[in-house]
Image: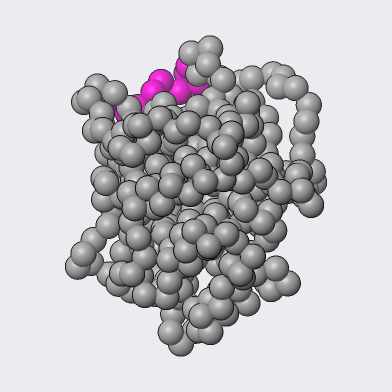
């Protein structure tokens, strides 16, 4: 976590007391994931098994200030919404390190689940059921003015019974602005909406105007993946996929999809962001298609048509993100030796 002076750094940002937890009650166990700016551990909080995201503060004053602001923004959004398809947020710590604590999902990431199935595909009603879970989570976020900006199988977690998908990792999420310029090149290239790319070069940090419809594009790529169980833009690197989608309007083939399902996918990844459906419309389209998949298709509760979105009571922490138990998502190294640690948890220690 850096040098002693960084460990003792006292940030100027504030978090509401209701969102803070006592670090002395937090025990940190084995590392289960790692990204560019954070590491995720399995742990314990009040005898509950949890996921603990430890955010790196950075080295320079500018970097520290930027990461603290991003951390505070992430916590603010996590506390704003709750939904059964968002991973439950339990609390946060500012000192001695920046920590986000959430429920721990034992089913792993959707990415790992699909990889383990290949070359087999999900049954259609299962794939569409997962898609509905994702769409409901996104509808919830958008109804609160939040754009996720990094929707992909690595950030979708499964419950232990592999029946429910929950959306995780709000590290890149932000509140939508109709006037303010927002950072381009945000997310993961292969699933990133074309309007997020620079029109000249792929320069990180460039500011652009875009809206919540970037998430609809990412959803289309995920839905295609759920049905085909193949990597989208297979044979291309992440950067090549980004370039092809943004500048050549290339998309994965939807020719082999049933007509109604193809319509959902292609409408969500349209080049014109404003022509893409919102997630309330996507939910309705998915539900209509699900009823045609087979006579044995499961009955979808009537509440699926509603967002189930609600603002939390003032004394309740919100819901949202983090990694899955013993799963190593994405394009970043996950352990020091690049292998999974399947040993049972041992030797919890205090995070203080």
77 to the left or right of 190: left
Q: Which residue is at a point 53% across and 12% down the rendered structure image?
A: 47
Q: Which residue is at a point 43% across and 71% down the rendered structure image?
A: 270
| Camera-nearest residue between 148 and 289 | 289
Q: Which residue is at a point 31% across and 64% down the rendered structure image?
A: 211
232 to the left or right of 4: right
- Seen as rendered, the residue at the extreme bottom is 200
Residue 231 shows up from this direction: yes
Question: Above or below — where is 328 with respect to 275?
Answer: above
| Camera-nearest residue between 153 and 163 | 163
The reply to whether the magenta stretch includes residue 21 is yes
> Could you say where residue 337 lies in the image, as x and y percent from the top left?
80, 46
| Camera-nearest residue between 163 and 236 | 163
| Camera-nearest residue between 148 and 51 | 148
* Magenta residue span: 18-26
> Could you say where residue 351 lies in the image, as x and y percent from the top left?
53, 26
Quarter of image, res 251: bottom right
> Could you say where residue 179 lies in the image, as x and y percent from the top left?
19, 68
182 to the left or right of 266: left
Question: Above or below — where is 126 with respect to 191?
Answer: above
User: Number of labelled discs?
Assistant: 0
Question: Above or below — where is 315 with respect to 248?
Answer: above
Q: Which residue is at a point 49% across and 59% down the rendered structure image?
A: 260
Residue 324 shows up from this direction: no
225 to the left or right of 219: right
- Seen as rendered, the residue at the extreme front is 295
> Could you say where residue 134 lies in the image, as x and y percent from the top left?
47, 44
From the image, which quarter does the N terminus lie in?
top right
The reply to whether the magenta stretch includes residue 325 is no
- Seen as rendered, the residue at the extreme top is 47
């Amino acid at each position: 976590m850096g040098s002693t002076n960084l460990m003792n750094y006292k940030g100027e940002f504030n978090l509401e007391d209701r969102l803070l937890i006592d670090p002395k009650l937090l025990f940190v166990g084995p590392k289960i994931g790692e990204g560019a700016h954070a590491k995720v551990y399995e742990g314990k909080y009040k005898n509950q098994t949890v996921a603990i995201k430890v955010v790196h503060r950075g080295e320079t004053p500018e970097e520290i200030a930027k990461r603290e602001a991003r951390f505070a923004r992430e916590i603010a959004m996590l506390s704003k919404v709750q939904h059964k398809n968002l991973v439950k947020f339990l609390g946060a710590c500012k000192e001695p390190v920046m920590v986000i604590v959430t429920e721990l999902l034992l089913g792993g990431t959707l990415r790992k689940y699909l990889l383990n199935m290949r070359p087999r595909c999900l049954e259609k009603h299962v794939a569409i059921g997962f898609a509905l879970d994702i769409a409901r989570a996104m509808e919830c976020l958008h109804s609160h003015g939040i754009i996720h900006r990094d929707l992909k199988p690595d950030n979708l977690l499964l419950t232990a019974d592999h029946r429910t998908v929950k959306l995780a990792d709000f590290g890149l999420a932000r509140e939508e602005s109709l006037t303010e310029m927002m950072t381009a090149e945000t997310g993961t290239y292969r699933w990133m909406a074309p309007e997020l790319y620079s029109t000249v070069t792929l320069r990180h940090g460039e500011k652009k105007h875009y809206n919540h419809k970037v998430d609809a594009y990412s959803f289309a790529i995920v839905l295609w993946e759920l049905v085909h169980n193949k990597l989208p833009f297979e044979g291309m690197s992440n950067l090549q996929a980004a370039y092809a989608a943004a500048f050549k309007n290339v998309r994965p083939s939807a020719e082999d999809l049933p007509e109604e399902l193809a319509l959902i996918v292609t409408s969500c990844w349209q080049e014109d962001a404003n022509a893409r459906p919102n997630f309330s419309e996507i939910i309705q389209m998915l539900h209509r298609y699900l009823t045609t998949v087979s006579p044995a298709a499961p009955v979808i509760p009537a509440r699926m048509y509603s967002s189930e979105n609600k603002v939390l009571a003032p004394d309740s922490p919100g819901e949202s993100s983090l990694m899955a138990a013993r799963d190593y998502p994405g394009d970043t190294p996950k352990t020091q030796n690049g292998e999974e640690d399947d040993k049972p948890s041992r030797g919890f220690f205090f995070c203080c």
